[in-house]
Every structure is written in structure tokens, then in C-alpha cells.
Amino acid sequence: MRLGYRSRVTRAAGADQDDRIVDVPGPARPHPSGSAWEPRVDLHLEDGLAEAEVDHWVRSACVLCSNGCGCDIAVKDGRMVGVRGRADDRVNRGRLGPKGLYGSTPWSHSPDRLTRPLVREGGDLVETDWDTAMGRIVAESRRLLDEKGPLSHGFYTSGQLFLEEYYAQAVVGKAGIGTPHMDGNTRLCTATAAASLKESFGADGQPGSYDDVEHAEAIFLYGHNVAETQTVLWRRMLDRIEGTDPPAVVCVDPRETDVARACGRTGGVHLPVRVGTNVALVNGLVRELLTRGWTDDAWVAAHTLGREDLEATVADYDPERVGHICGVEPDDVRRAAEIFGTTDRVLSTVLQGFYQSHQATAASVGVNNLHLLRGMLGRPGCGILQMNGQPTAQNNRETGADGDLTGFRNWQNPQHVQRLAELWNVDPMTIPHWSDPTHAMQIFSYAEAGTIGLLWVSATNPAVSMPESARIKRILGGEQCFVVVQDLFFTETAALADVVLPAAGWGEKTGTFTNADRTVHLSEQAVDPPGEARSDLDIWMAYADAMGFEDKDGAPLVKWRTPEEWFDAWREASAGRPCDYSALSYDTLRSSEGIQWPVTEEQPDGTARLYADAHFPSDTDYCETYGHDLLTGGTVTEEQHRAKAPAGRAFLKAEHWTPPHEQVSDEFPLRLTTGRTVYQFHTRTKTGRARPLDAAAPGPWVELCAADAGALGLADGDEAEVTTPRGSIRAPLRVREQEPGTAFVPFHYAGEGQANVLTMTVWDPVSKQPTFKTAACRVAKAGPGGGA
Amino acid sequence: MPHLATYVGLVDHSEQVLADSFRTVADGHAHVADVHHLCLTLAGMCDRHREQLAPVVERYGEEDLDEPERLRADALLQAREGEIGLLRDLQDLHLLASLVKSTWVVIAQGAQGLRDRDLLEVAQSSQQETDRQLTWLNTRMKAAAPQALIVAP
């Protein structure tokens, strides 16, 4: 196994069906449209432990992808030793994917956990106690506040913490320090989901539900390789695909993925577009709906704005031109549009192939346009899921620990800011609201220049995950900025910090989180954190206490102590907003099978689908944003928004396709795209410590199609060198079916094969999501395969 | 119509100056990724306005009569440095774009008086795009200003 990769081609029946490494989606429960998805319980216990030997089970949900599968944590002798899917949970009906099943618990008792704080002494990080570590942070924080004010502080958080922790961080950062420089790695994974929903509907919030899979007659997956990113959701789709009346699957992906292979057998179509051309494709699909009359004109007239401009923008995107730009057959564009236009129930899902690519927001908004033109929202099977990349990304967006304002509020709306000021009992001027909050890439630029003098990184590993890694490492390791890192492990990022704080992880603390279809779960503490590790919530509170943050009456700013108290504070903060949790409590969650917000007195059991009444959160006084120019990111003013009188109507917006920022050349003749493997999550902090997952995908690789590999004199298994203007990496070659002229590299791995050494520093003008999937590269043979 | 020709010349020149200045800022702040890429995109927008204007220039000419007062901004020849330098450069671009916009407004009025549909179309569509440039410049300046004014060295 030179590549150390167990091919899934050898998928087999029998015993292997219990092995989610070999049979990733697991046994089928095929069923026809409209019938219930049957439960199937996945269980894994470490060290051959039997189910009966488990001391007790603790309610939770999985955090190793964005699906949020309900599960119970097995505890034996005070250790987390495995997980079991919850058969009653609406998200997974008992199933778990390979990452969740094998990766959820081994990291927790890994011998290399951080158990004590570290501080830098004479160039080295040395163990210390909490008082010393927090003392260093507070001294630096106070010095900077005195000398430069709140703008000297930046916070870069995660998509892995709990809602309560993000909310605490939002209060500390926005009302304690008062800095606009707060963002999360959610900027890398999910910012475009939020941006596209805000631009089309006026506020964030997934319109659809996972239940739409059971009702859909067609499923469109736009840059969403669900077979690798959310295997339980893929199993759910497969159970329809393998049933008697499968939905037509339409897949937009340059690679020949498992999803792409499902297109043919369901009467769908695979559109292997060139990377960087998504906007041309969606404009072409929209044009087909318009010219073929596949629109619900009365609904569009009553519930949308902007049809004329949309028609003008897409007019030139006929199938021939789209085929030429995207490198696909014009008839395939026609066929895909026909499926969309003539099917009653279409579910669309969108992910990183759109979000991390060129013109991310414009492309994702195009998907919303297709549904709006057909009035296809809010009914079973008619969903849009602008997917999330991480399990708790949604909560980061809701609470405003990232570049959003708490409770999907609008920073341009003084009444919204006033309400937050009342909740926190601070002067509204304290809360930064003079501009869009600072996005992650800009935060790192300010840290590079030293105008951010304290950067606090929690539960994320930017030294590996951010584009142009060499630059990020220089910034984190430089003298110009004091860096605090709190994490489970001594990551590549922690190694560059000035202070490292040991954090408790999933199962070692209590909190809630919300998945990509608005399902809220409670995850209860199962075991104690190791050594002196503390929950992120406790760390934010300890910092707030040590800094002595006060409200305007001189009382402590932070008035809530336990996770449940923070949740209750959040319920109040969310009341009346689209993400309304006001009628949801820990007690409700302890007996729920997963409940979808909004949860209000009127809707105590939650809300399956948004916009069933075709009323959108676009009113000028209510909306989360007045919108942006999709080409430039320039903000629409309140006056301009009010003049349009949206009054609950959705926006049809479109932009012209522009060529990617970095185009192929003689020197760099191939397009580069990056992505994921089903066996690893992010930079492998957890999954790399689970033996079955590590064995299944231990190292990076490079993919080329056979023709491109042959032309370069490369064979499967050869050591390949990939070079862009930023740098070079080396990894073994895999020959795979994909769009010719494209090289693929997974982004999980640090070291010689670190994909983000290659990627560009560039981002979408609206969502500010970095472009990981569009660059130009060359590939050369670095060495032979075989005995290497 | 010598004065219309003067304005046609003025807008052609001003769009050229703005395009050159966008490119100067793009090159000078190449490490500021969004500014770099968007300034190049917006420079291309100016180029297209001039291309669309070209047939009109042929019809009306580009006369350059003496005016009582003459304001012709010159292009930014060199970008400034640092966060405060970027802010000043964006502000200069805003001034140049404002001149372009008001010139298109005047030309559109002339085109209406003349019932010249082609010229009106060019003037109105170019003015709309100049508005997009101004909106972005305004947004970007507002984002950059606090850090540049308060914290930058």
C-alpha cells in the first residue's frame, strides 16, 4: 500500500458492511418518494469493547462534518470510548459516517493533548500555570488598549465551538473590547452560504430541510461532493436513488466523483465545468428557464424584485456560449435546465465547489434565482440548502463571533445596534458598527502590518488551512503581533504562538449547536477535560473577569456563567430575529430528536422550511443587510434599499462571468483545485489521531486525468511536484477521471504536500471567502513510484 | 455644438485618467488582494466606456475650446504606501470618478436635448457603472479608515 490508501473499489458485502472505511455510506434502506427514511444504527466502540460493557451513554451530536448527526457518547471508566448513532434523530436516523464513527473519541485520550498552558520564554514555549498565562495576555491586552485602543485586537475563531461559546466571545469582543476585527474559519467554509442567502432573501437561514431528500424529484448538487463531505446525507440520497422512483441527479463538479457517477443512472446529467466558470453556468441555466417559459410568472411578480435586470444580465448566456466558457456540451446545459424547469420538486445543495471558487456569491445567488423563478421554496422537496462546511458554523454566524452582527442583525441599522446595546447594557457606540465587520483575510493583513497587535486564535489551525501558508506562518511567527492560541493540541499554529491555552473539546463540556438545515442539538459533557484544560466558554469568561469588563452601570459585563445561562441569554438575544430560539430550552433539547429553528411560542416544535408563505426577511427595518454589488462588494445604502420597497419580496440578482484572477499560461498550464477526502476533516487535528482514518488516508496526493498524466510522462504512484507562483509541494500521483487540464490536491495535510502553499491570497468581493479552488499550476515528475 | 464636443473630449480624457489611476493603485497596492484585483476590473470598465464613446467622438469630434475655467485632473502616477497611503489613493480615485460621473451627467443632458439616443445610452450606462465604482470606493474607504487613522504607524 504505497499510497497508504484503501481503495473503495473493493467495497464488499457482509462483514465489511459494518466497516465505514470500506463501505463508506453503509447498508442501503432504499425507499420510494414520500415514505419515511428507515433507521439504521451505526456503533463503534474502541478496543473491542462490547455495548453492554459501556458504563453510560451521553446525548450529543457529531462534530466531524456539517451534517450534525445525533449520537450518544459511550463512557467507560471516565473515558470517551466510542459513539452510537441515535435512531430517533431526524438528521441521521442512527447512521454515522467514517469520521464520526472512528474519529469522535480517540483524540480525547491521545497522549499529546495539551494539558497545561504554555508561554514563550527566551524563544521557547514552556509550561506554566493559568494565572501566569492569563496574566501575560491581560498585560498585553491592557497595554494595547491603552496605547492604541480596541482596533489593536483581533479574534479568529472556529466552526467547531458551541453556540454558548461563540455568543460569549461575541459579547467579550464586541462589547468588552469593542473591536470589529472578529471572524472565524467559517470565513473559509461557509461565508458564501450566509452571503448568498442574505443577498437573495434579506437574511441568513437555510430555506430547506434534509427531509426534502425524501420528496425531491430531482436533486441538483452544485460543487457539493456530498459523497466525501457528508456521507450520511449521501446515504440518505442514495436510499432514494436506489429506490423505485429515484430523483434525477444533476452534479456540477469538474471531477468524476461518486455523485457524478449517479447522474447517468438516474436520468440526470453531470456538468464537469472548468474551475472558475460557475457563474457562466448558472446564468445559462437561468436564461434557459426564462426563454423556455419555465417560470412561475405570477409568483415572481408578487414575491420578487429585479426580474428585468436579471433578464438583461443573463441574455448573452446561451447554451453554446456557456458550453464554450465552461467546457461542457451545450445540450447538457439544456438538459440540466429542462430537468430543473419541468420537475415539480427540486432540491438544490451548494458547497465548496461554488463557495471556494471564483465569483462565489454571484454563483451561489444564481442557484437561489433558479428556485425563485419557479416559486420553488417552502414546500416538501423544494428546498435550497446552501450547505455549511462545519458542524457549528451556523452558530458562529448567528451569534456574531464572526463577521456578522449578533442575531442576524444589520450593522447599518441603528435600531438593531440599539437592541444589542440594551441586551448587553452598554453604550451603542461601544459596539463597532461603522462598516462590514473585518473579514479573516483582512484581520491577518492587519496582523501582518502590526496594527492588530494581539491576535487570539481559538480552535483552528490557520498555519495549514489558510491560503498562501508561507505568508500566514510569517505573520503568526513574527514579532509585530502577540498571538494567543487555544486548542486541544499543539498544532502548527500553536507552535508559533506567544501563549498557548489548553482547551476542552467535544464531550468534555456542554453546549448546543446547529447544523446546515437549522437543526439544534444539545451536546452534554461526558467526561472531565484532561489536566488543566478548560472549555472555551470558561476561557472567555476568565479573560473577561481578569480584564474587568463592565457594563455602563459598572456591573460586570459578563453576567452569565453556565452554558445553560448563556443559552438562555442567547434565546433573549435571538427573539424576534430569523434565527429565533426563544421557545427552545435545554429541557426541550434533552427530549428532542433534533429541532429546527425558528422555535417560538407560535411554532414550539420548530420550523421545517422557511418561506412557506413566500414572505422573505427583506423589509428595510428587519433585514440583515441592505445588500451588495455582486461584482465589487460595494454596499447598498439604507436609502437605496428603502426606495426599492422590498416589503417581504426576495431579490433576483445576477452578475456577469469574469475570467478567474489567475489564468493558465505557458509557465503554469494547468488549473489547480483543492478539496477533501472522506476520511479526514480539516487539518486532521482529530481525524489524524484515529487509527482507521489515518490508515485510510495518511498522506496527500495529486490527481490528474490519464491524458494529462501521460503527456507529462507521469504514471499512477509517481512522485509529482506541483508548482504555482506561491510555491511547490510534492506528493504521489493518482490518475483519476476528471475534467482535462485540472490538477486536484486535498487540503488536509501539513508538510511537504501542504496544498495551501500553492493557493492564492484572493477572496470573493461579497462573502470575502478565500478562493481555494482557482489557481494556475504546473505538474512535473519529481521521482518514480514503486520502491520510494 | 462646440461645447458638447468639449465635454465629449473631457469625459474621454477623464475616463482615461481614471483607468490609468486604477491601474497605478492596483500595481502600487498589489499585496492588498481585493484592491489589486478590483482596481484592474474597474480600469477595464473605464476602457469599455471609452470604446463605446468612440463612434460618438467620430461624429462630434473632441474639441478643446478655451473655457473660462478648466479643471483637468491628472492621473495618479505613483501609489502611496501603507494603510494611510491606501486610504489617500482611494480618495483620489473617488475624486477622479466623481469628475467622470458629473461629466456623464452633463453629456446625458445634452444628448436628451439633441434627441441623440446613441449618446444618451452610452452616457447613462457609463454613469451607472461609474456609480458602482464610487460605491465600492466609498465602501472600501469606510472599511479602511478607522484602522488607518487610529492605529497605523
Image: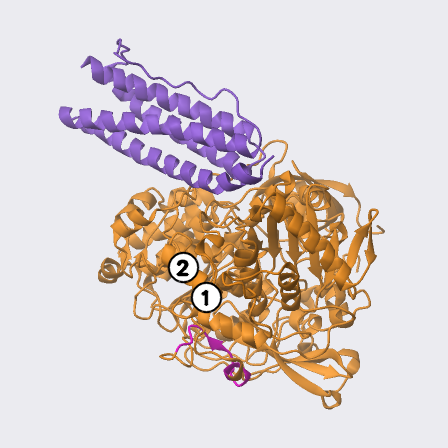
Chain colours: A orange, B purple
**Residue A700, how many percent across, how many down?**
72, 53
In depth, the one of A221 and A92 nearer the eye is A92
In depth, the one of A269 and B7 nearer the eye is B7
Q: Residues within 10 Å of mark 1 (few under 14, many from 20)?
A: some
**Residue A432, how many percent across, how many down?**
48, 51
Magenta stretch bounds: A588-600
Q: Is residue A595 magenta?
A: yes
Q: Considering only vertical position in the picture, is A755 above or below A221?
A: above
**Residue A62, how many percent across, how many down?**
61, 73
In the image, what residue occupies the spot 55% across and 31% down? B29
Q: Quadrant of the N terminus of chain A?
A: bottom right
- On residue A125, the disc is none
**Residue A154, how many percent across, how many down?**
60, 50
| Residue A85 visible (yes or no) | yes
Sequence order check: which comes first, mark 1 or mark 2?
A: 2
Marks 1 and 2 belong to one chain: yes
Q: Is residue B129 magenta?
A: no
Label 2 sits on residue: A418
Location of residue A348 (image quadrant): bottom left
Q: Considering only vertical position in the picture, is A410 above or below B11?
A: below
Q: Farthest top residue?
A: B66
Describe residue A150's horizontal placement relative to residue A428 as left or right. right
The chain that hosts pointer 2 is A
The chain that hosts pointer 1 is A
